[in-house]
Amino acid sequence: MGLTLGLLLAVGCGQQAPAPETGVEGQQDAALSRLRPRVRVATGYYHSLFIRANGTVWAAGSNEYGQLGTAGISSTSTPVQVPVLLGATSVAVGDRHSVALRSGGTVWTWGDSLSGALGDGSTTARTTPAQVPGLTGVVSIAAGKYHNLVVKPDGTVWGWGSNTSSQLGSTVYGNFPTPVQVPGLAGVVAVLASGNSSFAIRSDGGLWAWGNNENKQLGTGTFQSTVAVPVQVLTGVMAVASAETHTVAVKADGTVWAWGDNGYEQLGDPYVSSRNAPAQVQGLTGFVDVSAGYGFTLAVKSNGELWSWGHNAEGQLGNGTRNLQATPAQVPGFTGASFVVAGRRHVLALRTDGTLWTWGHGRYGERGDGAVTLYATPGLVQEGLTGAMAVAAGYAHSLALQYDGTVRAWGQNTTGQLGDGTTVFRLAPVEVQGLSGITAISASGARSLALRYDGTVWRWGDGILLPTQVPGLADIISIATSYKHALALRADGTVWAWGNNTYGKLGDGTEIGRPTPVQVSNLDGVMKIATGADTSYAIRYDGTAWAWGRNTESQLGDGFTVNRDAPVQVSGLTDVVSIAGGQNYGMAVRSDGSGWNWGSDINPGMGTWQYNRRVPTSMQVQGLIEVVAGYRTGMALTADGHLWAGGDNFWGQAGDGSSTPASSPVQVVGIDSGVTSLAIGSEHTVAALPDGTVWSWGNNSDGRLGRGQPLDVLAPVPSLLD
């Protein structure tokens, strides 16, 4: 992944290019002469390397295993120089290790040595580059997940590291910590490794493949999951790229060919699920280079245009959206492309003017653009948002209710969840149109909900661009929504529900979805309501807690794992004053300040770990007044004004300054005077403080934190790696 091969990749690295000939060979040479700069940059899962004009190597992204060539940092978006290396001519990136080729043809490695990936005979990780013994005069390098390939001056291929799928061309499965020859190959000028698969281009333009073929990515025309002996799969190849599950190539005539898995339309053909042999991508001509990431493909035309298609959840297609692209389309506004490399979810592209551009995912800093990658402590929402009395959080958007009864919104707006009449993402708060006199708000997924002083309920998002009144509701005093269903509490103590009804979460005794509200059966005297992912919760005036919906992980707390389409009492809880639910768990606070939780999750968070707690068990933190649940992150507010968090924390949503899972409660940094409102999305948190300011932390993709540059970049921006 992240590497692209061309037949003349080794030119300038110790091997002479074959003299131009007539026909296909001559066409190949002419086209490939434009692609030599590709050796300067490589990118993989979560880190990137770039060779500057002076021959030094610079790195950015994840450094968990020392793959950036430095110690003391876990990741960085600001490029750092890899020590020792001078005169570098080519780089390659594995999953957790790095490889460089120097001008004398020596090969250098650093990072994790799982499976012997560093080629020094050991499995010991190393942060400083060291030469692979016994290799000189090498003309091409490649790095797969845990294995590496090189081409020697005589055209033979050698490899080391993992051989679990015969990616080293051997049926002796296991690890090879020093280089061994791949049998059956001669006249090779370039190699490519991706995942557990291997490829080689011969001087005649023939493409050969071997190793893992579980997704048909080798293109052998068979359904064998492993191919131990190199097999020719295509002729006249000028460039090739692979991304574990699919492979794409450019032929000398400028046509593009693709094969393997097509789960994200990365083959450029929306009518097939996969291909086990190369097939031409229709409508593409005049191309000279290709690259492949996880589920997406990019291609460079001879005129400098850049085209992309396939998976786009992190903006990796560079077209300004997150929408899947089933067929090839030009990247808007990007011209003068020289070559492009794709990581797992991000892209680096070099222009003919020598500038390096990047877009897509950036959680580890792999774009090398200097962007903030982690907001792990609370910070002010920008644009001076004050006077807030309540907040709400969806999957990737946020809401704030102002004291004047208006609502502000920011973040993702793909389906109108910001209520401003557009689908434009907002990095700073904008006013929700047409709303006034609002007393409560709720959000989840891509939907938003608001309660007016007159007891009416209003909704937007999920394709509704402006607030619209929910029919059939009056005298409502409280609302709650998940990404699939919603609840409303009437002044008479009854609860009403609408939306998706899988698992019976509407509580009307059925599993029939309801587009308009229906009354929850056998439940009255309710004073509070809450929603989980597929569950519903209520507190009655008598202090008992009730739940219904999905119960496969005991998230209803009734002692069983049977789904309930009508309310059942949460076992053993009395005098309940607060209740909340996440994906697979529930939480509650009693009037004595004790906290309780039930259900299960990978990270137990606020409770003592016990898989599938069928009934409420005591939390580790006590003296509580309120609990709030996110998808898999829970929080509790104590009477002394402190905020505690537990569970998932990959994006820093626990607010303790780290991204370490909070398997025991951690205190949110800087919150020591309480909050007036708290909301947790799937990966971010928003809080309104007593002074009316709004604070946020966690994932800032799409600007959901309202704190400057979003994490994912949807269109090209300059990288600092160059």
Image (cartoon, rainbow, N blue to C red):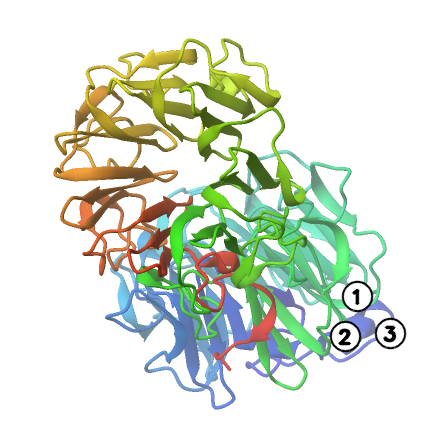
Q: What residue is shown with label 1?
A: 252
Q: CA distance from mark 3 to mark 2?
A: 13 Å
Q: Amino acid at mark 3?
A: Thr
| Image quadrant where residue 79 sits | bottom left
Question: Above or below — where is 456 with respect to 567?
Answer: below
Q: Is residue 501 left or right of residue 556?
A: right
Question: Above or below — where is 645 with respect to 185?
Answer: above
Say whether marks 2 and 1 touch (CB < 8 Å).
yes
Query: Picture coordinates of residue 698 (x, y %)?
Result: 37, 55
Q: Amino acid at mark 2?
A: Ala
> Is disc 3 placed on a helix, strand or loop?
loop
The answer to which of 555 and 353 lies nearer the viewer is: 555
Question: Is the N terminus in the top left, top right, bottom left or bottom right quadrant?
Answer: bottom right
Mark 2 vs 1, N-terminal side: 2
Residue at image position (79%, 52%) is 281
Residue at the bottom extreme, as displayed: 54
Q: Is residue 73 left or right of residue 424?
A: left
Q: What residue is shown with label 3?
A: 22
User: Alpha-carbon neighbours of circle 3 within 10 Å: few (<14), some, or many (≥20)?
Assistant: few
Mark 1 vs 3, N-terminal side: 3
Q: CA distance from mark 2 to mark 1?
A: 7 Å
The answer to which of 467 and 376 lies nearer the viewer is: 467
Nearest-to-viewer mark from 3 and 2 = 2
Query: Picture coordinates of residue 101 (x, y %)?
Result: 46, 76
Say whether marks 1 and 3 touch (CB < 8 Å).
no
Q: What residue is shown with label 2?
A: 31
Quick check: can you spot residue 578? yes
Question: Above or below — where is 206 with respect to 609?
Answer: below
Q: CA distance from mark 1 to mark 3?
A: 12 Å
> Is disc 1 placed on a helix, strand or loop?
loop
The answer to which of 534 and 46 lies nearer the viewer is: 534
